[in-house]
Image (spheres, grey):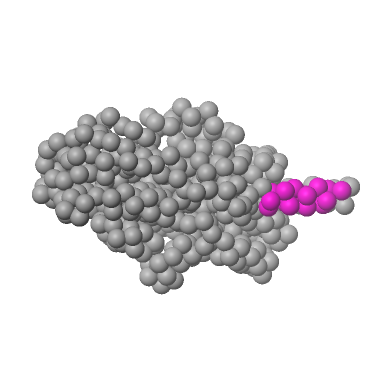
């Protein structure tokens, strides 16, 4: 069966757009400060392993490489995120090309991606979602090329990309499952009838094996983490599934991705691409059923945006051209303004509360030095004789990461924490029988029961009244552990 060819690629304008976004992200990368996840990745990068309690090794490895090459600062850490966002823009334009988009439509697809809130948000800071998005886009590109050409060799590219993506985040199995279901449902099933498919699976399995072996050897802790997230947030995730998808990508892009879905489903020459359209609603059903976060389905929306670029160009060229171009230009400006305000550190820190209902991650970049300073003031109130046997205990990885990052300059000892992989990196010696300074987001009888008499001694304030997770946290001084730390430690481990 003859498959359609594709137009030439709009190399220069697409690369200019990607470079422009990279320049903006670079200029803003040093504002606010580290995100709580980034603080965790920095410590994980100092404990390189084939796996961690809550993630594979790819993101901590990149965090370590980026800071080693570009400097141990927020800007230095975030270089790899900036490059990933720029690459994502180029890949989306290539996907549009696969759907037959002419050069102007490819540029439009790249421009929509460059303005999308989710892309800017994950491009601003290092997170597993940053590289997950790029991985999904590459998988989408190779899967679409496989469907368009029918050439089984693209299964190898799919296997290679999937294996690397699995070393970053297991979520990649969701779009693959959705696409497989869609291909079985509407075809072309011929792409499944080739020895290239098991070859691609083998490639993915070999690359992903080290982390999978680590997880199996350690009792699959990541499944425990995922179960806890679903149990804690599943209902809220389902309620906010549609609103947050629209808000996080951009409301102004809705007409384009809707047009993309209809274009793939209805256009006779694109009949081969119908499973790409169907994969999005299938993925939504999977995410809703598992209680996953709304952004899990956003990458497939970007593929639909790519598909909608050519129909949008066609709409611009049909009558009332100037009015339609003005409308599209206004939508682009509004998208840029809202996306930047909600996902990038362009507002004064004191105004961040305005965007937290849509993007709580903005607030998690503010207040870490202030937290550590408050802890240091409390620690220094302990008599020197007590400091020798005292323990500084953080109840979440953000606190622990901040104390490791900023604590030495404040004269603080290394903290301990039972949260995520911190529980594996250090356990207090049993001879640490003195007081415990316990950092709690709120008073917790469950935690305090493990220690002697506990008294609140300080409250955390970020100085900007930003309503983030740590604002209003308390530092509690307890007289000591109720039993040796080695016996107590399994009870203090937390997976979510």
Q: Residue at x 44, y 71 (%)?
A: 70
Q: Which residue is drawn at 68% across and 52% down?
A: 336
Residue 493: image quadrant is top left
Q: In this view, does 204 lie to the left or right of 143?
A: left
Residue 252: image quadrant is top right
Q: Furthest-bottom residue in view?
A: 69
Q: Position of residue 232 (x, y in %)?
A: 39, 31
Q: Position of residue 83 (x, y in %)?
A: 51, 64
Can residue 22 be seen here?
Answer: no
Between 69 and 139, the one lying in front of the other is 69
Q: Which residue is drawn at 46% across and 62% down?
A: 74
Can residue 478 be seen here?
Answer: yes
Between 331 and 283, the one lying in front of the other is 331
Q: In this view, does 407 lie above or below 487?
A: below
Instruction: Residue 327: say if magenta.
Output: yes
| Range shown magenta | 323-337
Instruction: Residue 239: say if magenta.
Output: no
Q: In this view, does 349 lie to the left or right of 448?
A: right
Q: Position of residue 270 (x, y in %)?
A: 64, 46
Which secondary structure dominates the residues rendered in magenta?
helix
């Amino acid at each position: 069966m003859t498959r359609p060819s594709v137009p030439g690629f709009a190399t220069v304008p697409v690369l200019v757009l990607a470079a422009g976004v990279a320049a903006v992200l670079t200029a803003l990368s040093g504002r606010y400060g580290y995100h709580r996840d980034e603080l965790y990745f920095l410590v994980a990068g100092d404990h390189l392993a084939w796996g961690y309690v809550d993630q594979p090794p790819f993101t901590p490895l990149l965090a370590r490489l980026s800071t080693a090459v570009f400097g141990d600062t927020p800007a230095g850490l975030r270089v790899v995120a900036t490059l990933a966002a720029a690459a994502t823009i180029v890949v989306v334009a290539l996907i549009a090309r696969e759907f037959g988009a002419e050069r102007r439509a490819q540029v439009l697809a790249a421009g929509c991606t460059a303005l999308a809130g989710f892309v800017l948000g994950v491009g601003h800071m290092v997170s597993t979602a940053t590289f997950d998005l790029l991985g999904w886009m590459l998988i989408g590109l190779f899967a679409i090329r496989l469907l368009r050409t029918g050439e089984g060799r693209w299964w190898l590219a799919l296997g290679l990309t999937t294996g690397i993506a699995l070393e970053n985040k297991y979520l990649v199995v969701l779009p693959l499952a959705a696409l497989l279901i869609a291909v079985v449902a509407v075809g072309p099933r011929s792409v499944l009838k080739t020895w290239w498919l098991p070859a691609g699976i083998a490639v993915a399995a070999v690359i992903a094996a080290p982390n999978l072996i680590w997880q199996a050897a350690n009792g699959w802790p990541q499944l425990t983490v995922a179960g806890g997230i679903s149990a804690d947030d599943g209902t809220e995730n389902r309620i906010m599934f549609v609103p947050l998808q629209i808000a996080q990508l951009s409301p102004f892009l809705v007409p384009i991705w809707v047009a993309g879905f209809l274009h793939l489903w209805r256009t006779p020459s694109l009949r081969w691409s119908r499973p790409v359209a169907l994969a999005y609603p299938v993925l939504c059903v999977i995410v809703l059923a598992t209680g996953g976060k709304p952004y899990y389905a956003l990458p497939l929306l970007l593929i639909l945006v790519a598909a909608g670029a050519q129909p949008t160009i066609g709409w611009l060229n049909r009558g009332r051209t100037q009015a339609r171009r003005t409308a599209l230009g206004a939508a682009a400006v509004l998208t840029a303004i809202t996306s930047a305000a909600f996902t990038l550190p362009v507002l004064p820190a004191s105004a961040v509360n305005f965007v937290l209902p849509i993007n709580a991650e903005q607030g998690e970049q503010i207040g870490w030095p202030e937290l550590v300073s408050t802890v240091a003031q409390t620690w220094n109130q302990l008599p020197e004789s007590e400091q020798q046997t005292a323990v500084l205990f953080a109840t979440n990885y953000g606190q622990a990461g901040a104390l490791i990052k900023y604590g030495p300059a404040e004269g603080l000892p290394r903290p301990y924490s039972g949260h995520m992989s911190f529980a594996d990196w250090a356990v207090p010696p049993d001879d640490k029988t003195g007081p415990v300074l316990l950092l709690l987001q709120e008073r917790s009888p469950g935690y305090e029961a493990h220690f002697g008499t506990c008294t609140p001694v300080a409250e955390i304030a970020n100085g900007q009244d930003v309503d983030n997770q740590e604002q209003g946290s308390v530092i509690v001084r307890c007289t000591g552990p109720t039993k040796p730390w080695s016996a107590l430690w399994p009870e203090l481990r937390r997976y979510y």
